[in-house]
Image: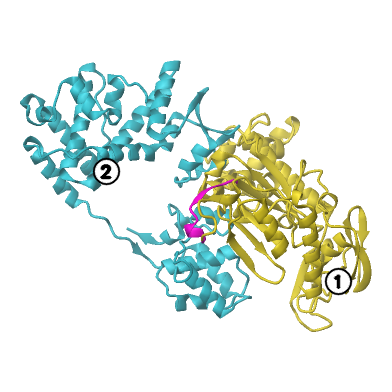
Chain colours: A yellow, B cyan
Amino acid sequence: MRPPDASFIRRCMRRYYFERFDMIELPSDMPKREFGYRRADSGMVRHIQLHDAADLRVLLLQAVPLEVYVSNARYLLPSQPIPEKVWEDAHLIFDIDAKDLNLECRPSHTAVSCERCGHGTPGPCERCGHRGVRKTSVACNSCMKAAGEQAGRLLEILADDLGVREGVRVYFSGNEGFHVHVHDEQLARLGAAERTELADYVAFRGIMPERLGVTRDRTASLPRPSEGGWRGRFARGVLGSKAGRSRAAREISSGGYDAFARRVGGMASSLGARIDPGVTMDVHRIFRMPGTINGKSGMAKVPCEDPKKFDPYVSAVVLSDEPVHVRASCPVPIRMMKRRFGPYSNEYVEVPAYAAAYMVCKGLAHVVE
Amino acid sequence: MAVLGHLELAKYPFLADAGGYLRECGFTLGQLADDRDLAPIRDQAFARVAAAVDEGKVYRPSIETSSHLPREVFSFLLAVVLLKMSGARHLAKKFAMQEARGAETLLERDLGRARTTSQVLLATEIIRDLSGVGIQKQEEHFVVPVHEYLRRAVTFHAREWKLINRRVESGLVYLTPHETVRLIRQELVNYIVSRIEGAATPPQVPGLQGFAERLSAMEARLRPKTAVSSGEFAPCVKHAAKTMADGDNLSHAGRFLLATFLLARGYTIPDIVPYFEKAPDYKKSVTLYQLEHLAGKSGKGTAYRCQSCQKLKTLGLCHEIPECAGIVNPLQFGVGR
């Protein structure tokens, strides 16, 4: 990030953390958590122990980090390196990222620019000749709606199958996805291997045909829509209505056991919740802290009641609307606070601070001093 | 603790308080060792261990007639005494394993036949005493909370134990009596091992010395087998190595797999570096630093292990072939015993 851009982002963040510290959700057992942060001009700083809100306030206002993280794990010694921290437990987290959904709309809201000079170019840079390009995805309601639907699907599986109804909190990640935090004492004690199983379960990965009533010898009893768990979900999602059920069942089980196994294996993306399994299984990870600003967008990680209806480009916009002058090269229009910005082709424009921060964080604009 | 009758003690003698039981029946260890009338119990105790170890037989207690019940408990308690006297630790583990298998069969039968509230209560309390798992009966199934299931089932490698292949509703996993008992098998073994290890080593009792010496001789025959590797790479590792060799980008997890596999197979860091040289973002200094870190030669000295097949499947890095059958870690590929 160029110095004037970094300075602008620092000003925005300092003001936000000074005026809106109440937006930050402090974790329970704060002294047992590992904190970390990243500044615009330096690498990651980890293994920090903070005892209370005052400690955090000092860190935010002095270091003014671009990103602030906190562990889902509780440790006896959070400031030690990982092998010496003495892990106690970690609440379960699922991460849903719109970019992993590979939606058809994605190319239409992805800006491609030269990774060396930033000039907007689909191939080798016309300005400097460099071949490497950087792809930057910008705000897209369709992507967020799809991610919200995945979060909704995950919540349904957690409640109906895993019995997790209390202590579930959904957050918009601040950029392009959702974090689902599950505060359940029993699940918090599970290790990485157990969490891998949970990740596979919610993602509908690894199911055997036998579980769905298909064996090597015969097709026994395909699931009924009224059944619970994955059998019922499979019946409702794949076999469909009562009228067409037998036909659908014949079609899907034609070709025998192996063909059925292949078909069912390919249904993970359409039936399962599309989470990032690496996040769920990691018991030592640090996550963006709720209420802090995401340095990739200038928007905040905020809680949301219903991810299917959540509009992050309104609800997660926390920076001011003071006018800022930027030179923007944003080939894709963005929509924030119900206003449209761009497209811009290396244009000098005046935009609200939140839109300026968004484009600067994405590398699509530079602040004009 | 479940309150056990004579029948339950005969079936699950490891749940008995050994000293208390002997006293209650009016016996001492000396009598068990020397009394001519009790010789069949001594022979049965020895045979119980020998059968478990030499023949891998699962012991079936004789519980049809009530007069046999104390003998079943005595022979188990005496078998433990013999194992303690012989100091045979491998033997003790094998014995515990076979006793556990026997108890499994009986426990499964008890769960399957439990109809009345008191029968269900007794069977579920025995399971709670052995494993700490709170199970409940629901219709024809037994249900276990998801977290309790996962803690145990993750150590099983058969696909049917994956959570997705179970009936899971409202936070409970549905199991048959057979599956319920299988789930706690390791805890059953551990319980019996702990009872053997926790038992006080008795003084050398002359009447039992001969049996103990024979067990010591059996212990000496138990030698660990050595593993021989064909040196072939697992398909997931081959795929990772090929991706790198083709100059394509390999995910962080894929690079971790390749490096930790090669390190575990005894490759040195200079041997491994060429595998990464064609990576689009290759930097020798970074590669060396990361390999040294993974090998535990820098940082805090933690050497990282190759991930399990299960984890690689979840990460989308598994490229299973028929030869992978039965392995749980890529390092086991092509390894014969």
Residue A322 located left or right of residue B240: right
Q: Residue furthest bottom?
A: A128
- Give the labeled residue for mark 2: B94
Label 2: state its secondary structure. helix
Q: Quadrant of the C terminus of chain A?
A: bottom right
Amino acid type for the residue under numbered disc 2: Lys
The percent coordinates of residue A134 (x first, y second) are 76, 71
Q: Chain of mark 2?
A: B
Tell us which disc is closer to us: 2 or 1.
Answer: 1
Q: Which residues are magenta?
A: A81-91
Amino acid type for the residue under numbered disc 1: Val
Label 1: state its secondary structure. strand
In this rendering, is residue A63 above or below A203?
below
Query: Magenta stretch containing residue A90, yes or no?
Result: yes
In this rendering, is residue B211 above or below A103?
above
The percent coordinates of residue B102 (x first, y second) are 31, 33
Would you call the spot at circle 2 few (<14 residues within 10 Å), some (14-19), or many (20 or more)?
some
